[in-house]
C-alpha cells in the first residue's frame, strides 16, 4: 500500500510541476494540411508523426487550435529530426507559427530524434491560439510533437524516459479503459489479414481487424502499390475480393482495386474494422495471449482487444514478438536445413548464418508534362544516388544491409530509399529529354519483403518447395518460382546499393502446411503473411500476396473450428484435420441460398 | 504461311549442317590445335605469350534440338587446364527466316562464361541482315557476362510479344520493367541471336563443365584460382582450401580481403571467425583494412571487436567517421563493456562529438553525456 501511495504522490507531483505545460501531438492536429501522418516507426522513435512529404514542393501548413490555461512566457520545443545530417542544409526544414508569430528557429535541423528548442512566446490568458507547421522544403520534414512550458527544461530524449514522461504529461492510465471482446482479433490488414477476417467472418465469427493505415491491403494498397502475385489455391473466391490486377508496380491503377478491397471487407457485418489503429502491445499468460492493446494513430485513443484467438498478420510479427513467441530473423546457415544451391552458393544460402535479409522497396514514378518542370538541388541525396539516373522505380529499387534491421531501422531504410529516389530523379533531370518531367508519386511507406518469421510446428524451407513436398495439411499451395533477392553491390561495389537482383529457382507446385501457420509456443496465436513459419530461403516463393492471402484464409477457417470445439490451433491439425480440409473444400463456391434451391 | 514454308525450306539443311558439323570451313579456328592470342571478347586475364593447346574432351554441347558440337579443353604447356571452348554453328530463326550463327565460345573451368571469338568470314547478323558492328559484339559480350539475365527465365515468344499476366512467372515483377530490361540488355535487332547465344553459354553445359573440372581438381588448380582475379575462382578456392590452406596462403587471403568484392570478403571473415580470438595479432591486417572495406564486411569484422587488441580499439576510435550509425553504436557499446577506456580514446570521442562535419556526432555526444 505504501508503494501505491508513493506512486500516486509522484504522479501528483508531476502534474503540479507540469501544470503550465502543454504537449501537442502533431499527428493529432485538427488539419494536417499537406503533411501526412506517419505511424510506421512508433516502436523505434516513440510516436506517429507528421511528415511533409511533398516530393520537393513545400506542402500546405498543418494547423490546430489550442487553449492555454495560464498566461505567461512559454518556452517551445519541437520533437523532430534532421533525417540527413551532413554538410548541407537539412532537407526537411520547417518553422513553427504560434498565433501570428512565426518563430525564427528553423526546425528539422537536429541530428537524431529529439527536442529542438524553437524559442519562446508570450501567451495571453485563456487565449485559444492557432498553431501551424510551415514546411520550407517539401522534402520530408518531420514533427512528432510540440511542447510548451513556462520552465526552460527540455523533455527527455531517451525513448524509455520519453514514454514515461508522455504518460505523465497526458495523465494516461496504464491500461486502455475501453475493452472490446471478439471471437478473433486479426492484427494487420494486408492481404493475409483481410483474407483471415473474411474467412472467419463468413463462418460466423465476430472479428476485429486492426490496421494502422486508412486503407487496407498493405503492400497491395494504393499507398505502396505492389501488385498481387501468385496463385489463388483453395481460396480464389475470397482472394478475388481483395487482390489487384497485374499492373506495373507503382501504377496508379492500384486505386481502383483499393476501392474494391475496402468495400468488400466492409461489407461483412461481423468484421469490426479499426482503420488507423496500431497495436502496441500483446500480453500472454501461460503461453496464451490475453489481449492486444492498440492506439488510434491520430487521436491517441486506446482500446484493449480480448479474444480466445489472435492472428498476427502484421508482417513484422509484432504480436508474436510481444507475446513471447519464438521467432527467427536473417539467413540460416546452409547446413541448418540443407538449402544449398550450387549455382548461387553464398548468395543463396551462406556457409555461416547471418542477418542479411531481402530488402524493402519504396516505389515511385514520374510523368511527362507539357511544360518545363524544375526540381530542387538535392546535395543530401547524391551520396546515395551517386550518378544513377532514373525516372521511375520498380521492384529492383530495394535496400537491405546487414547492419540495418528491417524492423528496428525501417525509418533509416525508408529514408535511404528517398535519397536514392530524389537523387536519381535529380540526375535524370539533367538530361534535356526529361526537362518536362515531374515526380508524380513517391511512396513514403516502406514495402517490406522480409522481417521476423514466427516459428510454428513446421518450418517451411526451400527444400519443401524444391521437392514439391506434399503434406496432409498442405492447405496453401503455390507454383511461382522461388526467388530470393540480394543487393547487387555485393558483387560489385560500383553498383548502387539500392538496387537488387532476383535469383530464381523453378520449383514444381509446392505446398505450405497448416502447421506453419500457428505458433509453436503461443497456443492461441495464428500467423499469416511474410511472418509465417519459414526459413529465409523458404520465404522466397510464398512471400507474395496471393500466397500470403491464402495463408490468411486458411487460418480464418481454422479459427472457426477452434471456436466451434473450443480448442487451440494445434488441435485442428491433431484432431480435426479432416473437418478442416472439408471446410476448405466446401467454401470454394458461394452457397446457393435455401430460397433458390 | 509462305514465310513459314520458306523458313522450313532453309531450316532443314541448316539443321543437317548443325548435326553433322559445318560443311564449310568454319570460324577461322576450327582447324587450330592451339590458341595463342587472347580471345577477342574475354573476361579473364591473359598473359602475353600464352599458348594453350586445344585437346578434345568427351563432352558435347547441344546447340539445338538435334545438333551437337564438341567441347575442347584448352591447357597450358604444363598441361594444366585453363579454359573450355566450343566452335558453334547453329541456326537462328526469327519469323521463319533462318541463318547460321558462327561463334567460338569460351568457358572458365567452373563453367562460367569466359568470352567469345567471332568469325571473320561469317559475321553475326541482325534481323535485317545488317552485320554486327563492333559495338554490337561488345553488347553481346556484356549480355553473356550476365549469368542471371532476364533471358534466363523467359521463353523467346514471351520476349517478342507482351505476355499475359497469367503467363508471367515474374518476381514481384511485371512487363514494364521486363520489357525495358530486355531492350537494354540485348543487341538491337538481334534478339534471337542473343537469346540463342545466352542459352548456349549458360545452359546445362555449365554444370557439366564444372563437374568435369571438379573431378580433376587438385591443390595446384585451387592455388591458381586463389591467385586469379576472377571472383568465382576466388570463391571456389576459398570454399575448398580447408583450414590448412587458409594458414598456408594467409598473405593472399588478407590481400583478397582488402581487394576482393564484398561477397569474397564476407566469406573470408566468416571462415576466419575463430582466428580473431585465437590469434589476435595475426588478424591485424584485417583491422587495418576496416576503413577501406564495404559496410557489410565491416559489420562482420566489428563482430570481433571484443577480441581486438587495445591498439586496434584505439585506432578505430580515430576512424569513427567511416562507421555507420549502428556500427558506431556497437563500437560504443564495446567501450561500455571494457574494464577501462584509455584517455586517448576519450579524447578521440570528444573530438568526434565536437565535429560539425560528422553526421553521427550526436550519438557520441549522447554517449559522452551518459558517461560524464
Image (tube, coloured by chain):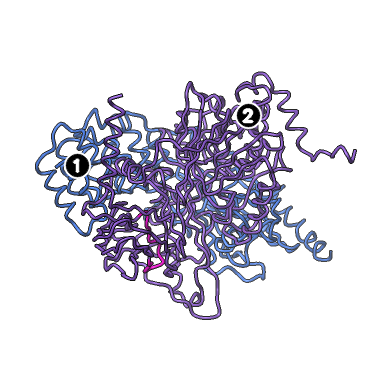
Helix, strand or loop at mark 2: helix
Residue B25 appearing in the image? no
Q: Measured from the top left, where is residue A83 in percent x and y?
A: 34, 57
Residue highlighted by disc 1: B370
Q: Chain of mark 2?
A: A
Quadrant housing the N terminus of chain B: bottom right
Q: Which chain is purple?
A: A
Q: Measured from the top left, where is residue B179 in percent x and y?
A: 61, 61
A77 falls in the magenta region = no
Which label belongs to residue B330?
A: none
Q: Which chain is blue?
A: B
Q: Measured from the top left, where is residue A169 in percent x and y?
A: 33, 46
Confirm whether circles 2 and 1 share one chain. no
Residue highlighted by disc 2: A514
* Magenta residues, start to end: A134-145
Residue at 36% across, 64% down = A129
Give B257 or A358, whichever is nearer the viewer: A358
**Secondary structure of the magenta portion, mostly?**
strand
Amino acid at each position: 500500500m505504501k508503494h501505491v501511495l508513493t506512486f500516486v504522490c509522484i504522479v501528483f507531483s508531476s502534474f503540479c510541476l507540469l501544470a503550465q505545460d502543454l504537449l501537442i501531438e502533431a499527428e493529432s492536429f485538427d488539419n494536417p494540411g499537406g503533411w501526412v501522418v506517419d505511424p510506421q516507426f512508433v516502436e523505434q522513435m516513440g510516436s506517429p508523426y507528421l511528415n511533409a512529404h511533398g516530393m520537393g514542393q513545400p506542402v500546405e501548413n498543418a494547423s490546430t487550435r489550442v487553449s492555454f490555461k495560464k498566461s505567461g512566457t512559454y518556452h517551445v520545443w519541437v520533437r523532430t529530426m534532421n533525417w540527413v545530417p551532413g554538410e548541407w542544409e537539412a532537407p526537411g526544414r520547417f518553422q513553427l507559427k504560434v498565433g501570428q508569430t512565426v518563430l525564427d528557429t528553423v526546425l528539422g535541423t537536429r541530428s537524431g530524434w529529439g527536442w529542438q528548442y524553437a524559442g519562446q512566446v508570450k501567451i495571453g490568458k485563456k487565449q485559444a491560439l492557432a498553431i501551424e507547421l510551415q514546411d520550407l522544403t517539401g522534402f520530408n520534414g518531420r514533427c512528432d510533437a510540440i511542447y510548451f512550458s513556462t520552465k526552460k527544461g527540455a523533455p527527455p530524449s531517451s525513448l524509455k524516459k520519453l514514454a514515461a514522461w508522455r504518460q505523465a504529461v497526458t495523465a494516461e492510465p496504464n491500461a486502455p479503459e475501453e475493452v472490446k471482446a471478439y471471437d478473433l482479433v486479426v492484427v494487420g490488414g494486408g492481404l493475409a489479414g483481410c483474407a483471415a477476417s473474411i474467412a472467419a467472418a463468413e463462418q460466423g465469427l465476430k472479428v476485429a481487424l486492426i490496421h494502422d493505415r486508412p486503407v487496407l491491403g498493405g503492400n497491395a494498397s494504393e499507398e505502396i502499390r505492389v501488385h498481387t502475385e501468385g496463385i489463388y489455391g483453395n481460396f480464389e473466391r475470397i482472394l478475388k475480393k481483395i487482390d489487384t490486377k497485374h499492373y506495373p508496380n507503382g501504377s496508379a491503377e492500384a486505386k481502383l482495386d483499393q476501392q474494391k478491397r475496402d468495400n468488400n471487407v466492409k461489407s461483412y457485418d461481423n468484421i469490426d474494422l479499426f482503420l488507423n489503429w496500431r497495436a502496441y502491445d500483446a500480453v500472454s499468460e501461460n503461453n496464451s495471449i490475453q489481449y492486444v492493446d492498440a492506439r488510434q494513430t491520430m487521436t491517441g485513443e486506446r482500446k484493449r482487444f480480448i479474444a480466445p484467438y489472435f492472428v498476427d498478420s502484421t508482417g513484422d510479427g509484432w504480436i508474436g514478438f510481444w507475446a513471447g513467441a519464438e521467432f527467427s530473423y536473417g539467413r540460416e546457415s546452409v547446413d541448418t536445413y540443407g538449402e544449398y544451391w550450387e549455382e548461387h552458393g553464398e548468395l543463396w544460402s551462406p556457409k555461416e548464418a547471418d542477418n542479411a535479409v531481402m530488402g524493402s522497396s519504396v516505389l515511385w514514378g514520374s510523368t511527362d508534362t507539357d511544360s518545363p518542370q524544375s526540381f530542387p538541388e538535392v546535395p543530401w541525396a547524391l551520396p546515395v544516388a551517386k550518378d544513377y539516373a532514373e525516372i521511375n522505380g520498380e521492384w529492383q529499387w530495394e535496400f537491405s544491409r546487414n547492419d540495418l534491421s528491417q524492423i528496428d531501422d525501417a525509418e533509416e531504410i525508408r529514408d535511404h530509399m528517398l535519397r536514392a529516389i530524389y537523387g536519381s530523379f535529380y540526375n535524370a533531370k539533367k538530361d534535356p529529354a526529361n526537362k518536362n518531367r515531374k515526380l508524380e508519386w513517391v511512396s513514403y511507406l516502406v514495402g517490406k519483403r522480409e522481417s521476423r518469421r514466427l516459428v510454428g510446428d513446421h518450418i517451411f524451407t526451400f527444400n519443401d518447395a524444391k521437392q514439391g513436398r506434399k503434406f496432409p495439411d498442405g492447405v496453401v499451395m503455390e507454383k511461382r518460382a522461388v526467388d530470393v533477392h540480394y543487393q547487387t553491390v555485393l558483387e560489385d561495389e560500383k553498383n548502387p546499393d539500392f538496387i537488387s537482383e532476383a535469383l530464381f529457382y523453378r520449383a514444381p507446385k509446392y505446398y505450405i502446411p497448416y502447421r506453419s501457420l500457428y505458433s509453436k509456443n503461443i497456443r492461441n496465436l495464428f500467423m499469416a503473411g511474410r511472418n509465417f513459419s519459414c526459413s529465409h530461403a523458404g520465404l522466397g516463393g510464398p512471400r507474395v500476396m496471393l500466397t500470403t492471402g491464402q495463408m490468411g484464409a486458411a487460418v480464418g477457417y481454422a479459427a472457426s473450428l477452434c471456436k466451434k470445439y473450443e480448442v487451440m490451433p494445434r488441435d485442428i491439425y491433431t484432431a480435426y484435420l479432416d473437418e478442416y480440409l472439408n471446410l476448405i473444400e466446401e467454401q470454394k463456391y458461394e452457397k446457393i441460398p435455401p430460397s433458390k434451391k | 504461311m509462305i514465310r513459314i514454308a520458306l523458313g522450313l525450306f532453309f531450316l532443314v539443311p541448316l539443321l543437317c549442317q548443325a548435326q553433322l558439323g559445318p560443311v564449310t570451313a568454319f570460324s577461322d579456328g576450327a582447324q587450330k590445335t592451339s590458341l595463342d592470342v587472347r580471345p577477342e571478347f574475354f573476361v579473364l586475364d591473359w598473359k602475353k605469350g600464352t599458348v594453350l593447346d586445344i585437346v578434345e574432351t568427351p563432352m558435347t554441347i547441344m546447340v539445338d534440338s538435334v545438333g551437337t558440337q564438341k567441347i575442347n579443353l584448352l591447357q597450358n604447356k604444363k598441361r594444366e587446364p585453363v579454359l573450355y571452348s566450343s566452335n558453334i554453328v547453329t541456326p537462328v530463326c526469327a519469323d521463319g527466316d533462318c541463318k547460321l550463327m558462327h561463334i567460338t565460345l569460351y568457358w572458365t573451368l567452373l563453367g562460367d562464361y569466359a568470352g567469345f571469338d567471332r568469325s571473320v568470314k561469317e559475321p553475326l547478323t541482325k534481323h535485317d541482315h545488317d552485320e554486327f558492328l563492333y559495338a554490337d559484339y561488345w553488347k553481346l559480350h556484356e549480355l553473356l557476362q550476365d549469368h542471371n539475365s532476364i533471358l534466363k527465365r523467359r521463353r523467346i515468344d514471351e520476349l517478342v510479344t507482351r505476355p499475359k499476366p497469367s503467363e508471367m512467372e515474374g518476381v514481384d515483377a511485371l512487363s514494364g520493367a521486363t520489357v525495358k530490361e530486355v531492350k537494354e540488355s540485348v543487341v538491337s535487332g538481334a534478339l534471337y541471336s542473343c537469346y540463342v547465344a545466352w542459352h548456349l553459354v549458360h545452359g546445362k553445359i555449365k554444370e557439366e563443365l564444372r563437374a568435369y573440372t571438379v573431378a580433376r581438381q587438385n591443390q595446384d588448380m585451387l592455388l591458381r584460382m586463389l591467385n586469379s582475379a576472377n571472383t568465382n575462382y576466388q570463391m571456389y578456392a576459398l570454399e575448398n582450401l580447408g583450414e590448412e590452406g587458409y594458414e598456408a596462403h594467409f598473405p593472399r587471403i588478407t590481400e583478397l580481403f582488402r581487394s576482393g568484392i564484398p561477397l569474397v570478403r564476407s566469406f573470408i571473415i566468416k571462415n576466419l571467425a575463430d582466428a580473431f580470438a585465437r590469434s589476435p595479432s595475426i588478424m591485424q591486417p584485417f583491422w587495418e583494412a576496416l576503413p577501406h572495406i564495404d559496410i557489410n564486411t565491416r559489420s562482420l569484422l566489428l563482430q570481433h571487436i571484443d577480441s581486438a587488441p587495445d591498439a586496434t580499439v584505439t585506432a578505430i576510435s580515430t576512424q569513427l567517421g567511416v562507421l555507420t550509425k549502428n556500427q558506431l553504436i556497437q563500437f560504443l557499446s564495446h567501450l561500455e563493456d571494457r574494464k577501462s577506456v584509455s584517455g586517448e580514446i576519450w579524447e578521440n570521442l570528444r573530438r568526434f562529438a565536437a565535429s560539425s562535419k560528422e553526421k553521427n556526432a550526436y550519438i557520441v555526444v549522447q554517449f559522452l553525456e551518459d558517461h560524464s
